[in-house]
Image (cartoon, rainbow, N blue to C red):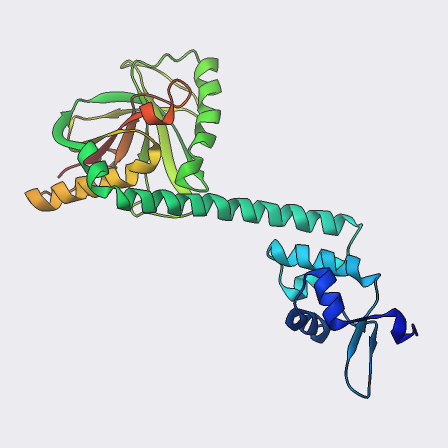
Amino acid sequence: MAETTDLMTIGQFSSLSRISVRMLRHYDLHGVLVPACVDHMNGYRRYAARQLRDAADIRNLRDIGFGVSAIGILLAARHTPEWTNALRLQRETLLEEQHAAQGRVALVNRLLDQGEATMSITVDRTTVPAMTLVRLRGTVPTYSDEGQLWQQMMPALSAQSITPIGPCGVIEHDDQYTERDVDLSIFMPVAPGTKAEAPLEVVDLPARDCLVARVIGPYDQITTAHDVINARIAADGLRVRSDDTLAAHAFNLYLTTPDRVSAEELVTEVYEPLA
């Protein structure tokens, strides 16, 4: 056993490691960072200089979000693939949390500017003419993952030599808002009589009576556009279309797209079919 004169008191170790005495005792209790020596007469903990490296790793793991039980497992896995994999997985988790936090900040900003934002979204009632669409239907993790479908559709359009004749869009198939596994159809308007092969499909939609909200700016305003539409529905005593047909589903038209303009210059129309 090392002589206690070669060891540090818990206070000295706390100062050097930048871990509080309270947490050092907590880590000792859970077997994560056990003192090099404990005086059985008075219970004083003593630490060795070599344990400062362990303390640094523990502090870093704690600061990136690992709990005490996970820290103990990871310390034993240092210099192994399990250590690297755990850190990479935690990085992905933190990036998802960062994205969610940015979304919450954006929502706070919208609430602070709600009056101005609402005024910038105009709503009109219009008859959408009949249209022929070529579409690709699929399920994506969330609404923001719609781009995965476009990555499939664009090469298919090119391979089949199909030429769109208007702005693209998306149809929401789910009967309710869902946070995961979203059922969408992305589409391009095409000339009547156009033929397509799987995975693409050509559909004909009739003329429809709709409320349409025009949004200028980033896509995160689309939810606000639905709120504005809902306010108009309530104010005018309107009813949304609810029959079990494709024509009854809400859809968006992208009049401009991110590959051509900045986020602030995007123009999107949000349509809600009426009964």
Using residue 259 as the reference point, say whether residue 205 is left or right of it: left
How many marks are shown on the rendered structure? 0
Q: Quadrant of residue 34?
A: bottom right
Give percent across and percent down for residue 112. Answer: 27, 45
Q: Out of 59 and 244, give the one closest to the viewer.
A: 59
Which residue of the protein is positioned furthest toward the bottom in this rendering? Answer: 41
Give percent across and percent down for residue 178. Answer: 36, 48
Q: Where the N terminus falls, by quadrant?
A: bottom right
Q: Quadrant of residue 222?
A: top left
Give percent across and percent down for residue 26. Answer: 66, 73
Residue at screen point 67% across, 51% down? 86
Using residue 40 as the reference point, say whether residue 229 is left or right of it: left
Q: In this view, does 201 lie above or below 145?
A: above
Q: Out of 228 and 10, give the one closest to the viewer.
A: 10
Q: Where the C terminus falls, by quadrant?
A: top left
Q: Out of 101 and 38, give the one closest to the viewer.
A: 38
Residue 202 in view in this figure: no
Using residue 45 as the reference point, say whether residue 92 is left or right of it: left
Residue at screen point 33% across, 26% down? 264
Residue at screen point 27% across, 46% down? 111
Q: Is residue 260 above or below residue 208?
A: above
Q: Is residue 181 above or below residue 1?
A: above
Q: Quadrant of residue 28?
A: bottom right
Give percent across and percent down for residue 252. Answer: 28, 30
Residue 197 in view in this figure: yes
